[in-house]
Amino acid sequence: MQLKVLEKKQNEVVIEIDGEGHTLCNLLESVLLEDDEVEFAGYTIPHPLVGKPILRVRTKGNKEPKDALREALIKIIERGRALKEEFERTLKEYHEVSSN
């Protein structure tokens, strides 16, 4: 994955994400929109055969877009870890019940 900043303003950033698709971008957009300081977050994929989504993030002014992105990525990592832990706990319980 490679990132390329296409446009940067005080409260807005546009980034090209080479090598990704809807899976990551949809998740990132969704988590960004949970932030009250994010005015707009969205992405487009200009051509379906080329995996280069364009992500646009605009904040209301109290937070820089890069900080909103950083916080969203941290939330995604934390949620992934929590899901993994819950999955492993549930799988362990399942195997314990199945063994009896």
Image (tube, rainbow, N blue to C red):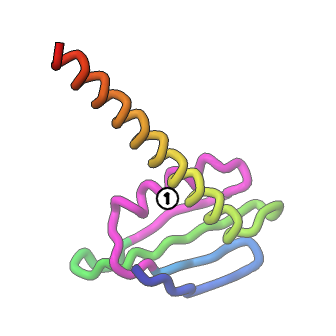
Write down the quadrant of residue 64 in the picture.
Answer: bottom right
What residue is drawn where x is 25% and y is 20%? 96
For this view, does 24 lie left or right of residue 30?
left
For this view, does 4 lie left or right of residue 37?
left
The magenta segment: 17-44
Kindly give the residue lying farthest to the left in the view shown: 99
Write down the quadrant of residue 37 in the picture.
Answer: bottom right
Kindly give the residue lying farthest to the front in the view shown: 100
Q: Name the residue carrying label 1.
A: 28
Q: Is residue 66 above or below residue 23?
A: below
Q: Is residue 46 above or below residue 61?
A: below
Element at badge 1? Answer: helix
Residue 62 located within the stretch drawn in magenta? no
Give the quadrant of the C terminus.
top left
Write down the quadrant of residue 60 in the picture.
Answer: bottom right
x and y percentages locating residue 20 in the rendered image = 35, 72
The residue under label 1 is which amino acid type?
Leu
Residues 9 and 19: in front is: 19
x and y percentages locating residue 2 in the rendered image = 44, 83
Residue 20 located within the stretch drawn in magenta? yes
* Residue count near mark 1 (Cα–Cα under 10 Å), binned few <14, some 14–19, many ≥20: many
What residue is drawn where x is 67% and y is 62%? 68
x and y percentages locating residue 61 in the rendered image = 80, 64
Residues 11 and 25: in front is: 25
What residue is drawn where x is 51% and y is 54%? 77
x and y percentages locating residue 15 in the rendered image = 53, 79
Kindly give the residue lying farthest to the right in the view shown: 62
For this view, does 74 lie left or right of residue 16?
right
